[in-house]
Amino acid sequence: MPEKVWKRSVCPFDCPDSCGLLVETDGKTVYRVKGDPEHPVTRGFLCRKMVHYERTVHSPERILTPLRRIGKKGEGKFAPISWDEAVGEMTERWKEIIARFGAQAILPYSYAGTEHKLQFSAGHAFFNRLGASKLERTICASAKDVGFEQIIGSTPGQNPEALAHCDYIIIWGSNVTATWLHAQANILEAKKRGAHVVLVETYRTSAASLADEVVLVRPGTDAYLALMMDRILQQEDKVDMDFLKEHSLGWEKFLESLPSYSLEEAEKITAVPSEQMTSVARGFAAAKSPVILFGAGMSRHGNGAMAVRCVTTLAAVTGAFAKPNGGIIGNVSTGGVYCLDMIERPDFQKEPLRTINMNQLGSALCDLQEPPIMSLYVYSSNPACIAPHQSAVLRGLARENLFTVVHERFMTDTAKYADIILPADTSVEHGDLAASYGTRCVQRVDPVISPLGACKCNFDTFALLGRAMGFEEDYFTQTNETLKEAVLAASTTIQQGLSAESKAKFDAGLAVLLPQKDACAFETESGKIEFYHPELAEPLPRYLPDPSGSYPLHLVVAPHQAMLNSSFSEREELVRARGEMKLLISPDDAKRRGIHDGSIVEAWNDLARVRFFASVTEKVPSGTVVAEGVYGKKQSLNGFTVNALLKEALTDGGRAATLCGNTVDIKTIEG
Ligand SMILES: Nc1nc2c(c(=O)[nH]1)N[C@H]1C(S)=C(S)[C@@H](COP(=O)(O)OP(=O)(O)OC[C@H]3O[C@@H](n4cnc5c(=O)[nH]c(N)nc54)[C@H](O)[C@@H]3O)O[C@H]1N2
Ligand SMILES: Nc1nc2c(c(=O)[nH]1)N[C@H]1C(S)=C(S)[C@@H](COP(=O)(O)OP(=O)(O)OC[C@H]3O[C@@H](n4cnc5c(=O)[nH]c(N)nc54)[C@H](O)[C@@H]3O)O[C@H]1N2
Ligand code: SF4
Ligand SMILES: [Mo]
């Protein structure tokens, strides 16, 4: 019997924490998983999803061999085949499609099943070389990124660890108790020291338990709320003029625009009482260490990039950026330390290629011509469950003439529509490069066990497909491990930018923290906060209504604590903890429609009709309904989930999904 040892790894899931893992193994089996106490940020912590990661790795539900469909599309009947057969069939079909329609009739679809850099970007070089249609990967936070870009550029702001030392914290549209647990831990620390915590939300999420007060804002109106707070401070002569003069440009024009905001309008538009707006504005301005923690929720609206730009102004007019540990949190990303071009190979693309937005997959599959999409290759994503306009996505996936390949760990709703399924490994079965969007950490990831069954990681699969397609570039002769080492050797930050102590730690597989940047070293062209951008359609931050639709209730989608989007659906205990597919409804809206708690309701808009169990709760203000979690067909009541009610329209900046900017009406079905 080989001896059991503890090996280091990193949680691969799309989560800001990127927790350090210790994995007990004999090289073949994962026995236990625990948090790495030597991780400088997560310090031994793991969330409820990852404490039993061994149950995911060794789940009886794992797909361990390539499969060919033998039933109808969507039915889920498959027979095992060999890799040679699978790859042979794929290359033959792709060559036929390319000859008849051109390579742009092939579309990759992927997102963040793993956020580690090698596997995330593993397909780019292959599809560039193939000349396939390109996928715009903007389902998540690209509107938030653009909102920041248009005022503070790529300035990272504070690390979440700074929260522990802040005395006034505004959590603006993030459910940190579900999605950002080490930020939560730091907020709890700050509270012990007497910090005042405000939550700005569309409903009382579990993060309300951290807050001294909850500001319930009407969805899509945060820009008005933030600009009104700026206006209040202007009227009370509390704008930090010294800070603005030293650290910003265009502040004169911005301050001149503020008198158009009034308390009366603000109350009408945002539904926030004027006393509360005033007291939060005053509290934030007077604090010694004020900080705003940004979630992506407010950015998932038709006016979402602008909302982020406007909320950022509050940290500027109060001079919060210059106060100790103050400013903003929510723009960190460490992926740039790795030379991603070595993985993605943009130089393999020989001509301009058609781009398809991942949020519009449904209409792309159903309607696009010249050429139509004739083959879809899905990896690290589950579009049947996570994408907007679900009915169109499912109709597209059901097309008999669409040749679909899905590279997966589990039989997801998407995989059920595949012609060929390829078995994917889990994060402990391959090496990778870990970065983070919630800490300043980077870490190398080494394989812990050999791949189970015939599973292959994303990169090794694409290298194999490249060789099978006859691509002669040396790139496709690399293995996942050789590419990883080459990317690491080429990273100047890692090879030259770390202290000797950090470099030794990094090489030994420990997480290292990149140095904290000066919060006032603004990463814009001018090196200052830029309020005014004459080159943009909207030169100044201002409130624009959210084009969310005309049904009477705002529909907000939010994450669930027990799962990560549709990932972890293989884990019975987590599926049970999440429970049925619910729609949270205010007592007021429920009463008006004769809806009782636990009964079945139908929500509808122009796109679909979707049934849910009603959860009538005071947590939701009237006028808003909320669907937490990403569900699959198995738990749906009429074949659809909330994603069928989400339109394909994109945000004002960043071409992101307007996941939270939709409207519906609801009615009772029974009980
Ligand atoms: N347990 C768990 N963790 C996760 C995830 C998960 O599914 N489960 N998902 C992961 C992913 S992919 C991401 S991108 C991150 C997201 O993490 P964050 O970006 O920090 O955001 P969320 O926690 O999703 O919270 C978004 C909140 O925005 C609110 N919201 C929606 N519209 C508005 C609005 O107009 N104004 C305001 N003020 N609030 C609004 C919603 O009610 C929701 O509570 O979390 C990651 N972590
Ligand atoms: N209703 C609703 N819809 C949402 C959201 C929401 O909160 N509510 N959140 C939105 C957001 S913020 C995001 S980021 C997207 C997320 O959308 P996705 O990135 O598609 O997220 P998941 O649903 O977790 O699906 C990831 C899939 O990748 C697979 N996988 C994991 N690791 C690997 C690997 O190494 N290789 C391969 N080939 N596959 C792997 C997993 O088994 C899983 O099926 O969803 C969006 N959609
Ligand atoms: S899902 Fe997030 S909180 Fe849970 S272990 Fe992974 S990184 Fe940490
Ligand atoms: Mo996301």
Image (tube, rainbow, N blue to C red):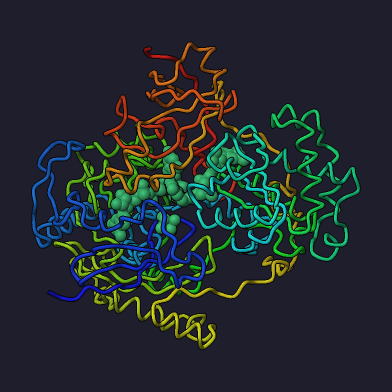
Q: What quarter of the picture does the C terminus occupy?
A: top left
Q: Nearer the viewer, residue 528 or 595?
A: 595
Between 371 and 594, the one nearer to me in the picture? 594
* Residue at the far front in the pictured view: 192
Residue at position x 32%, y 74% in the image: 446
Q: Is residue 625 left or right of residue 611?
A: right
Residue 358 visible in the picture: no
In this orientation, which residue lies closer to the viewer: 316 or 356?
Answer: 316
Tell me if 311 is positioned left or right of 559 in this view. Answer: right
Position of residue 3 measured from the top left corner of the image (x, y, whole percent): 19, 76
Residue 160: image x %, image y %?
59, 60
Residue 8 visible within the image:
yes
Q: Position of residue 30 (x, y in %)?
A: 24, 64
Give the percent coordinates (x, y) of residue 244.
Answer: 83, 59
Q: Quadrant of residue 230?
A: top right
Residue 421 sits above or below residue 662 on the image: below
> Going 63% across and 43% down the picture, which residue do you hit?
211
